[in-house]
Structures are given as C-alpha cells and as structure tokens.
Image (cartoon, coloured by chain):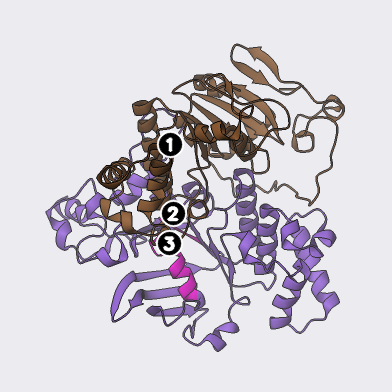
Chain colours: A brown, B purple
Amino acid sequence: MNIEKGRCLGLVGESGCGKSTLGRMISGMERPDTGSVLLDGLDIYNKPSREIRALRREIQIVFQDSMASVDPRMNADAIISEPLINFYGLKGQCLDDRVSELLDMVCLPDGDKTKYPFQFSGGQLQRVCIARALASEPSFIVLDEPLSSLDVSVQAQILNLLSDVKKATDVSYLLISHDLEAVYYLSDSICVMYAGMVMESIEDIGDFYKLKHPYSLKLLSLRGKCGADSTDIENVSDSEDRIKGCPYYSRCPKHSEQCKNALPSLEKIEEGHYIRCYNY
Amino acid sequence: MEPVLEVKDLNISLKEGCNTYKAVENVSFSIGKGQTLGIIGESGSGKSLTCMAILGLLPADVWDYDAEIVLNGKSLPFRDNKAMRGYRGTDIALIMQNPMSAFNPVMTIKRHFEETLAAHKNWNKNQIKAAALEMLSQMRIKNPETVYNSYPFQCSGGMLQRIMIALAVIMEPSVLIADEPTTALDLTVQFEIIKLINQMRKKYNTSVVIVSHDLNVIAGIADEIAVMYSGFIVEQAPAEEVLNSPLHPYTAGLFRSRPSYSKERLSEISGQPLSLKQRNSMCMFSERCPLKGEGCSNFEMLAHKVSDDHFVRCCAKEMTKTSA
C-alpha cells in the first residue's frame, strides 16, 4: 500500500487481523520479517538506529487507549513538552507558548496543563495524545483506533479536528478503525484487512460503494442497523481451523471448493480497485 | 403494566472533604417486565453511577446517595451491603464493559461458574457443570466443554463477553444491567452480543437496562431511551420517538454529529460538558446549546412533559410549547 502526501488511508478490519501490527511496523516499532517501509523513498528499517530515532519526528502515532499511552505521573504540560524538548530543544517561554498553542489546537483550556492523566476524561486525554503527536510537526501520523474510546459527540469533534489538521499541515494519515462511517469521512482511500491480509482496497473513496468482497459487505451491512431481532448468531470456538485456502472461508456466505484449497491472490479488477476473492 | 424495577429520585453526590458535588440528580425511571431501557450519555454524565447505585456498589465513604429503588414491589436495601448480596446476581445481574478485566485471571471459567452458583444455589459440582455447559452452548459457543475448563486469557474478548452474559443470566435475574457491554469489542462481535442479550431477554422475560454511548447499539435494542447529560435525564421517551424526532437540543446534536457516509463537515456539539465542580443552577447544557436563550441561565432543569411518555428538560422547548 502507499499513502501520498496529505492523504489518508483508512484501514478496516476486526481485532487480531493485523491492523495495529501494520501500524506499528509503519511507525518503526516492530521490525517486519520481510518487505520494507519507505518514508519519502527511504527505507526506515535499513538505517542505523540513531537515524531511526530522527525519523520518529516524522512519524507519530496516536493510540487507542489514551490512558495506557501516557505516563500517569506526568501532567499534560510534561506530556506535550517531551517531544518539543527532545526534537526541538525548546525551553522556557517558547516551550510554554508552544504547549498552549497545541492545547488550543485540540480545544483544551490552558488551565489543563497542570492536570494529570487521571483527572482527564477519555476524550480529553485523547486530545492530549493528539497534541503530543502534533508537537513534533510530523509528516505522517498513524491513528490506531483513535475514536473507539470516545463519546459520540467527542468523536465528531476529533474527526473534524483531524480533518482540519490534515488540511492545515498537509500531514498524511493511516487511520486504523472499525468504524466505517468515520473512515469514510476522513479517508481518501480504503483498505479492508482480514487475518493479516489485505482483502480489498480502493484508491478513491468515491468508489466506496463498489466494495465487493464478502467480508467488506458484511462490515458494510453491520453499520447503521443493529438488527437485534435477527436470530442468526454466529458460533464462536476457541480455535479456528487452519486451512490452506482463504482465511475467510469458514465464515464466507459465498465460499466454494476452490476457496478451501488455494488462497486467492490480490487481483486488480478495475483502476484503483483490488480484491482477494474468487467469488466476489 | 406493573414495573419490575423502579428508581425514584436518585441523587448521587461526590464527597470531597467538607464539600459535596452533585453527580446525578433526580433520576427516575421504571422498567416493565421484558422491557429494555437504553441509557445514552457521554462519559461523566452519570450513566454508570446510576447502574452502580441500583446494585448498591458505590462506596459510601466517597459517594453520598439517596433514592427509592423498588424491585418487584419491594424496596431495595441498597445501603446494607450484606442484604444486597442476596439480590446481586440473583435478582439483578450486571454485565460489565471490559470482559478482559471482569474475570479473575487466575480462576478458570469453571471456578467462576462454581463461585457464582454456589453462592446462591445448593447445587453440587455436576449440576453446576451441566447448567453451565447448557448456558454456554446457548451462547453459541461451539465447544463449551473446552471453554469451561480454560482460563480467561485463553478466550477472546467476544467469547469472554458471551461467558459473562452466561454467568449473568444463569440465575435468571429479573433485571439485567448491561453497562457498555459492547464498547470494548469488535464491530462484528458487538452485534452478536446485542443479539444474544436480546435473545436472553426474550427467553427469560428479563428486563434490561443497557447503557452505551453508541447510538447504533441503543437504537437496535431499546424500547425506551433515556438521554443523560451532566447527571440529569434530559430526554426520555419511547425509542422510536427519540430516534425520529429528538426534542432536546443535545439529543438532536448527538444524532447529527454521527458521520453517515458523507464527506460533509460533521456538525459537532462544541465545547465540553461541565465538570462536577462547575455545575450550578443554570441549564447544564446551555454553554453548548445552539438554542440558548435568556431563560437558560436560571433554568432548574425541570422536566417538561411533551406527552404521557415523553419528557424533556429544556426551557427552549417549554417556550415554544407555551407560545404555540
């Protein structure tokens, strides 16, 4: 996959499908076995660790669980100052002003500087995390489920905030989420993952309704209506049977013999639309 | 219809030194048999406090609370921890938000069932096992026997949530409180859990209080919706009415702020809810309200009845009603 400057790729899939691992690899936290991650054409893993450290300024990440991603003994001021001190060596009044500016950007009052993580609500703390990510003026931000711990009214604020920041700073995003509506709102292209593989990808979000993979369709059908009355509840077991073929085989409504025996490859079916399925 | 659970004038305040701060005010609701009440609200609005108060689980040295809670015609002794033990699990069961932390990590699923059932029923281990396995397979767990003997960390979040529902409904409680049952779960799993809760409700005719901030979850399951904001129920009505014609500006704003497959800028509710210490005698929502008028600054959050089963706490609505 590739993400252009100032654009956002939405990555959708359920937990355990490898979305977050991919996000961590892209942000330089988890070394891939094979393959490479290029930032501005440079391989971020094929470098001495000192240079990788400098790259951290360019790639930032916002995690799902804001409470777990901050030091509980640091106040908001210290949390946001840390990248400013590390990367820019700011101090004194300069540092103070920049922190205020960042807090203002994420719509938090200046007085929140002295607050500690436990004094914030989940939504407020997530803003602090976003402010921290923005502090180093990165060119790329990995957003790992940034909305799922937030309230609906706050989600809208954060989505608008992220969209404003993208327009203002030309930063690129990888938005990892299971909320398709949010992904549609913020992203320019979309990728559907299942069991560690890209199942379908669309380069132009305008073609969203062309999503065809049975798994994408399942995700689409879930949003918006909950259907509590239907009785077709999926069975779960503690161990999935591993098969050679398509990993979605056992849950797929359209599965055939072919799917069981061989893994379909990611085929291009039209310009900017790739799919991994025999029977779409 | 005779209500199963009735909460009257629930007030909860936080004690801090010699000050008290009101966290939940005048919350009253009742649920009929087999009915589902959905409570929506943002974090800090008092949803979970309300649930915990019903179960008598708020520590008395931190929270000061007062209410009349009536279960099946009898008043609940929520101040008396010992007496409440007889109700928890048997009459009122709780499904918690995070299935990963709700289980004891060093106890097998089997021990969890044994602990719960031994506390309330005089069953031997074989009876418990039979009942548990039956319940687990009702939860659509393919291999209940293996799961029964496994530890919580060996199960996925969705599976643990199913086990938690099994543990909650195995005593056939008359009220099931589900506090954000799907928040920690995947989208695909979320709806399975909602379906299961709904199925159990129908089967045992249980009344369900479901708390969530996810509108989709509430919309799918609730018969009646209560919208909470800053400790007040600001709007309460049958689900259809709230979803189709929300009256309170907060409710309406909440529905508008959901992205719905469009690139148009989301209309957000600006600002933040007041913190506990900022609350005063004005309308709690007035700072963020698009309909803010003069009456808002000394509005005492009185309930305004729109119809028999629909009320709103908003003075703007009151004004339009009286002028109309």
Q: Judge the density around disc 2: few (<14), some (14-19), many (≥20) Cα neighbours within 10 Å.
A: many
Left or right: B142 as drawn, with respect to B19: right
Q: Is residue B243 above or below residue B160?
A: above
Q: Chain of mark 1?
A: B
Which residues, given as a range, are shown in magenta? B36-54
- Between B38 and B16, the one lying in front of the other is B16
Q: Secondary structure at mark 2?
A: helix
B152 in the magenta segment: no
Q: Secondary structure at mark 1?
A: loop
Amino acid residing under circle 2:
Gly
Give me the residue at 33% from left, 61% from top. Answer: B230
Q: Nearer the viewer, mark 3 or mark 2?
A: 3
Read off the residue under disc 2.
A122
Q: CA distance from mark 2 to mark 1?
A: 20 Å
The reply to whether dot 3 and dot 1 touch (C-beta < 8 Å) is no
Amino acid residing under circle 1:
Pro
Q: Judge the density around disc 3: few (<14), some (14-19), many (≥20) Cα neighbours within 10 Å.
A: few
The reply to whether dot 3 and dot 2 touch (C-beta < 8 Å) is no
Q: CA distance from mark 3 to mark 2?
A: 9 Å
Q: Judge the density around disc 1: few (<14), some (14-19), many (≥20) Cα neighbours within 10 Å.
A: many
- Between B43 and A168, the one lying in front of the other is A168
Q: CA distance from mark 3 to mark 1?
A: 29 Å
Q: Chain of mark 3?
A: A
Q: Chain of mark 2?
A: A
Amino acid residing under circle 3:
Phe
Residue B105: x, y in percent? 70, 66
The tag on residue A118 is 3
Q: Nearer the viewer, mark 2 or mark 1?
A: 2
Read off the residue under disc 1.
B259
